[in-house]
Image (cartoon, coloured by chain):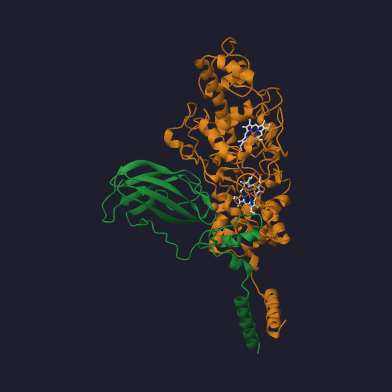
Chain colours: A orange, B green
Amino acid sequence: MGRIEFAIAFLSILIAVVAPGPSHAQTWTAAERSILRSLWIGSLPQLPKDSSNQVADNTEAAKLGQKLFFDMRFSGNKKIACSSCHKPEKGFADGLPLAQGMGAVPRHTPTIIGTAYSPWFFWDGRKDSQWSQALGPMESPVEHGGTRTEFAKILYSNQAYRKSYEAIFDELRDTTDESRFPNIAAPIDDPQSRAAWDAMKEGDRQIVSRIYSNIGKAIAAYERLIIPGPSRFDQYVEAVLNGDQATQKELFTDDEIGGLRLFIGKGNCIECHNGPLFTNNDFHNTGLTPRTDAPGNSGRAAGVKSVQADEFNCLGPFSDAEDADCGELKFAKLSGAELIGSFKTPTLRNLGKTAPYMHEGQLSTLSAVVDFYNRAPKAKIGRSELKPLRLTETELFRLKRFLMTLDGPLMVPQALMSPPR
Amino acid sequence: MAQLGLFIIGAFAALFLVLAPPPAAAQMKMEGGHGAAHNQRGKPASAHGAHQADTRPTKIPEHLDVARTKFSEQAKFSVNVTSRLDPVTINKMHSWVLNLKNPDGKPVRDAKLDISGGMPMHGHGLSTAPRVTKNLGDGKYLIEGVRFNMAGWWELKIVIDSGHHKDNVTFNLILK
Ligand SMILES: [Cu+2]
């Protein structure tokens, strides 16, 4: 070390020690502050209108939906409800790598928190509304394992359900006549259910599908209300925006600040995990290795085809939307290399409660996640959008510490966190 | 004496700052959304091992033309685009109006427009499939179904076919 360098090093240490005022790590430029504001929960807009669901904001519908969400009778074995996999105490996920319903589900259970803000649902976006999404698991043989005619009959036979259904929608049609409405019938893969469905009159099928779609709409009215609340990160951003240095210091350690800098900087995380929910709700290939070679692994490429063909989509006969309200569906990208092996960007809020991670629960910890992004392996299916980050161990540690600041209580009244009484 | 000491410290401090800019300051030159953040990505492909050869630009060109009115590449048309969402923000479905003229300023009616684009630095296309949904008359066209899903540098490319001439034009956008 030359004399000059030595003097510089010495003096810089001196300056660092004696320099008054905030430490360097605490200062954010105006451009950085505007990025922080964009991630801040205070930037979350009002719940977007769901034009496809005319009871989306109806409180009675939300009450009915809450009941349905927790009710295990709406399943083939009477043991599965939405809440079996979307457990309120687990951040509305289940803590398992792959979900378990009436059978083994080949996908990891994502949270439902804040999904009202998303135009697309499921990892591959094969649904375009919360209500039509809810109809997926109910007829999936490995999830609820029921059929829509069974569900219509359960509603009809239960006084309380029937009353609240009729108060919200219209007369609940009588589906008890087994010659017209077989006990198990639905247009699904199961050959028996399918044959029974095909044998029904078109008008009767319409009656059942209408009731079924209304079940979804009530569940969605409840689900919409499950939104995240402020985390420690949000309190920190508020302090930054207020220029409150003391509170900033109290709230965030230097490691967390460093992690946040990486998140919005050379980690590139903010490209996809943007906005107050830390997701663009769009589809990306991150090159995760699939556990199996199931056909669903083409991700969005297949998902977008399904949603187009879905009778319960925004443009379909059961939707309350006008054609003009269905922009996402009408202008969805149908082809392109980017769709192959792409999955929906999940929210990063409440990661502490929703491990393991990714669409097949491939990564069990946040350490594994940041390590994965650092390596950014080549995709087995399609082409990964990621590039290796080449971060140091310390940087990875900081990034992880930052991700852990995104946990917070939900903005949900306690009464909505369990079955209604 | 004390003042002289302070002066020396100050001078060395200044020198130090010049020689070694603190990382955070260097990291966040944000003129282009997340442009600076991407400099790290664009190392030669060989450095990435597994990844294929990469010809993507690693940063936003210095004098990027972000004009919303320009001539098409072979100057067959004068094209203006106006977003109905202003400022253009990410993750919002919105529409644009395209105003098409010939070089003399006469409206070009009934042209066929094909819209594509993407992020040059990321190598991906648009996140939606926008198209002309309405001929508004007088050389104006409504383009619906635009939604950008990231901050940064985007291109909006339009192939124009008037029946007499075919040409293309590319508009650049920097989204925050
Ligand atoms: Cu991009």
Residue A253 visible at all: no
Q: Position of residue B13 (x, y in %)?
A: 63, 79
Q: Residue at x 48, y 63 (%)?
A: B61
Nearer the observer, A60 or A124: A124
Give the residue furthest to the bottom. B1
Q: Residue at x 56, y 50 (%)?
A: A275
Q: Position of residue B26 (x, y in %)?
A: 59, 68
Q: Is residue B59 above or below residue A274?
A: below
Q: Residue at x 37, y 44 (%)?
A: B142
Q: Is residue A389 left or right of residue B103?
A: right
Occupied quadrant, residue B55: bottom right
Q: Is residue B97 left or right of residue A163?
A: left
Nearer the observer, A362 or B57: B57
Residue A399 visible at all: yes
Q: Position of residue B1 (x, y in %)?
A: 65, 90
Q: Is residue A155 left or right of residue A335?
A: right
Q: Position of residue A267 (x, y in %)?
A: 63, 57
Q: Is residue A93 above or below residue A376?
A: above
Q: Is residue A350 above or below residue B68?
A: above
Occupied quadrant, residue A142: top right
* Number of marks in picture: 0
Q: Is residue A338 above or below residue A138?
A: below
